[in-house]
Amino acid sequence: MIQPTASGKRIKFMMTCLCDAFYADVAKASYEVLEHLGCEIEVPTGQTCCGQPALNSGDWDSARKVVRHAMKTFEGDEPIVIPSGSCAAMTRHGAPLGFEEESDLEAVKGMARRSWELCEFIVESLGIQSWPGRFEGKVALHRSCHTRNTKIYDSAVTLLSSIDGLELVEVGELEQCCGFGGTFSVSFPYVSKQMGQLKVEHLTEKRPNYIASLDMACMMHFGGMMDRQGVTTPRLHVAQILKRALENE
C-alpha cells in the first residue's frame, strides 16, 4: 500500500459517500476537528465516491471512471483527508491496483501519496500525540481490515488513549473482519452474518459504554446487527469522540 507523504494544514476533505448518505454527523465532526487544528479546509463540491464498491464487485472499468473523476475533483498538491480507513485504503491501494496497465497510473499514485485517513493525518502528518478535553466512559475500538499495514489504527489509539476520562478496553480477535466487506455481505450473506455476530460478541464482551470505529461501513454492518439483537451500546466514529472531548475542554 502506498504511504502518504508529509504535508501541511491546507487540505481537501473527502467526505465519503457514506457520510453523504447516512453519517452527516461524522463529516461535520471531522470538519470541526480539522478546523480546531487550524486547517484550511476545502470541500470539493463535485466529489462522489472513491470507487471501491465497483472495484470490489470486479467492475474495474466502472471503478476507473470513478477514480478518474476523483482525481479531477481533488486535483492539486494539498493533502486529501478522509474520515474512513476503507476509502483511504481504496485511494492508496485499490486505485493504483486497478490502474496497473493504464497510462495514467503515475497520476493515480500521485493522488494516493496525498491521501490520509483522518486520525493518521492528525498524528503522523501534524505530529499531534495527545488530544485535549474530556470524554467519560469505556470505549471498544473496532479495527477494520482496511487499516492493516498502515498507521491508521495506531494513530486512533494514540489520540483516544490520551483523552481524560476515556478508557480503551481490550477487544478479542482484533484482526477479525466484521463480515461486511462491501459486496461480500451481499454475495455471501450467511457467512457475513456469522462473522458479524462474532464481531459484536467481541466488541461488547467487556461491557463498554461506547463502541468506536474508523470505518462507517463496518459500523453500519455490525451496528445493524446490534439493533436487531436489541444491543443498545452507542456506536460512534472516532471523529465524533474527538469532537465531544473538545466540547468538554
Image (tube, rainbow, N blue to C red):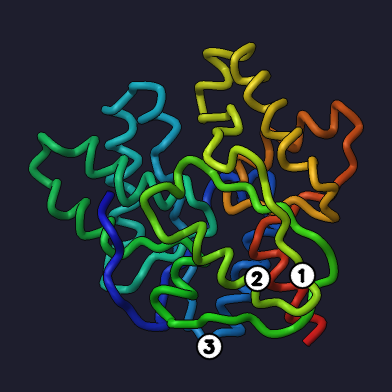
Q: Who is closer to the viewer here, 227 or 27?
A: 227
Amino acid type assigned to the residue bearing label 1 in the image? Leu
Mark 2 — residue? 161
Q: On residue 166, which mark appears?
A: 1
Badge 2 vs badge 1, beta-carbon distance below 8 Å: yes
Q: Is residue 134 above or below residue 199?
A: below
Q: CA distance from mark 2 to mark 3?
A: 22 Å
Q: CA distance from mark 2 to mark 1?
A: 7 Å
Helix, strand or loop for disc 3: loop
Helix, strand or loop for disc 2: helix
Q: Residue placed at 72% from the left, 26% from the top?
A: 197
Q: Which picture quadrant has residue 77?
A: bottom left
Residue 207 rendering spot, x and y as whole percentages: 85, 47
Q: Who is closer to the viewer here, 113 or 66?
A: 113
Label whose residue precedes the other's in the sequence (2 or 3): 3
Q: Is residue 123 left or right of residue 235?
A: left
Amino acid type assigned to the residue bearing label 3 in the image? Gly
